[in-house]
Amino acid sequence: RPGAGAGGNNDSTYNPYTADQQQQDSSITDETKAQIQTRRAHRETRGRLESQRQVEKSIAEVGKMFTKMATLVSQQGETVERIEQDMEAAQMDVDAGAQEIEKLYGITKGNRGLILKVFGILIFFVVFMKFY
């Protein structure tokens, strides 16, 4: 050991640094610690900024989805209205058809005897022409 010679001290703890060097080392470590903390804070800030940007993108996407949904709902509302109008028109046509069938039934019911007589005469002529 360098300090344990003939004229040296017999210290049990050997310190290779002088007081000035220790102070410089501690100031360097303080500067390094400050730099590390600054870098950590910068990374955290960047992380928060990136998270905020992701949230903004997500909110924008949700807004677009709501706009699309509103458009779809509006279009479907128009489609439902058209279907309802078509159903009403079909119901009116069915009612009109039923009335026409009732009229036809009334006409044929009153003329049923006449129809049978005409049909009988036609059969008679067909049979008469066949034998004659």
Image (cartoon, grey):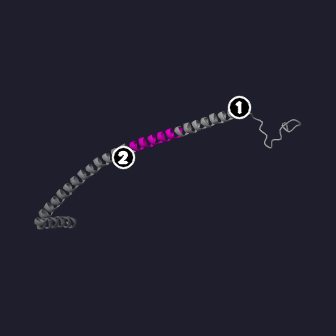
| Above or below 84: residue 111 | below
Query: Residue placed at 29% from the left, 49% from the top?
Result: 77
Q: Amino acid at mark 1?
A: Asp
Query: Residue placed at 30% from the left, 46% from the top?
Result: 74
Category of crowding for the residue at label 1, using alpha-carbon neighbours closer than 10 angstroms: few (below 14), some (14–19), many (at least 20): few
| Above or below 132: residue 11 | above
Asked whether the residues under the numbered discs 1 and 2 touch, taking CB atoms below 8 Å apart as contact, a structural biologist would say no
Point out which mark residue 6 bears.
Answer: none
Q: Position of residue 32 (x, y in %)?
A: 64, 35
Q: Position of residue 61 (x, y in %)?
A: 43, 42
Taking the image as shown, residue 64 lies to the left or right of residue 99, namely right
| Above or below 67: residue 115 | below
Which is in the foreground here, disc 1 or disc 2? 1
The verdict on residue 56 being magenta is yes
Residue underneath mark 1: 20
The verdict on residue 108 being magenta is no
The residue nearer to you, when weighing 58 against 22, is 22
C-alpha distance separating marks 1 and 2: 73 Å
Q: Which residues are magenta?
A: 46-64
Quarter containing the C terminus: bottom left
The residue nearer to you, when weighing 12 against 78, is 12
